[in-house]
Image (cartoon, rainbow, N blue to C red):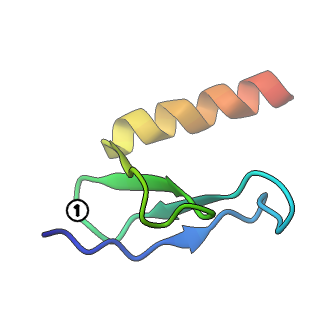
Amino acid sequence: MTTFVFRKSGYSNAHEECVEVATNVPDIVAVRDSKDPEGRILRFTPAAWADFQRALRASSG
């Protein structure tokens, strides 16, 4: 079983949507909802995660 070490996004706060990301496992970026730590974990390749981050930055700028 893979053990992810999650960290909370700097954009999260205690009262709204909270995202945690783990990058400690090679070739996987794991994402989960911090308010549901036993829930589903989304897994991305580092390239897909980088594409997602670029898309977010482009849409917010």
**In the rendering, at what x and y percent does residue 53 appear?**
59, 38
User: Which residue is under mark 1?
Assistant: 26
In the image, is residue 29 above or below residue 56? below
Q: Amino acid at mark 1?
A: Pro
Residue 20 occupies quadrant: bottom right
**In the rendering, at what x and y percent does residue 13 appear?**
83, 65
Question: Residue at image x 28%, y 53%?
Answer: 28
In the image, is residue 28 above or below residue 23? above
**Could you tell whether 33 is left or right of 18 in the image?**
left
Question: Residue at image x 54%, y 61%?
Answer: 36
**Could you tell whether 7 is left or right of 24 in the image?**
right
Residue 23 occupies quadrant: bottom left
In the image, is residue 14 above or below residue 47? below
**Could you tell whether 7 is left or right of 25 in the image?**
right
In the image, is residue 19 above or below residue 10? above
Question: Residue at image x 49%, y 66%?
Answer: 37
Closer to the camera in the image, 10 or 51? 10
Closer to the camera in the image, 24 or 8? 8
Farthest residue, direction left: 1
Report the quarter where the N terminus lies: bottom left
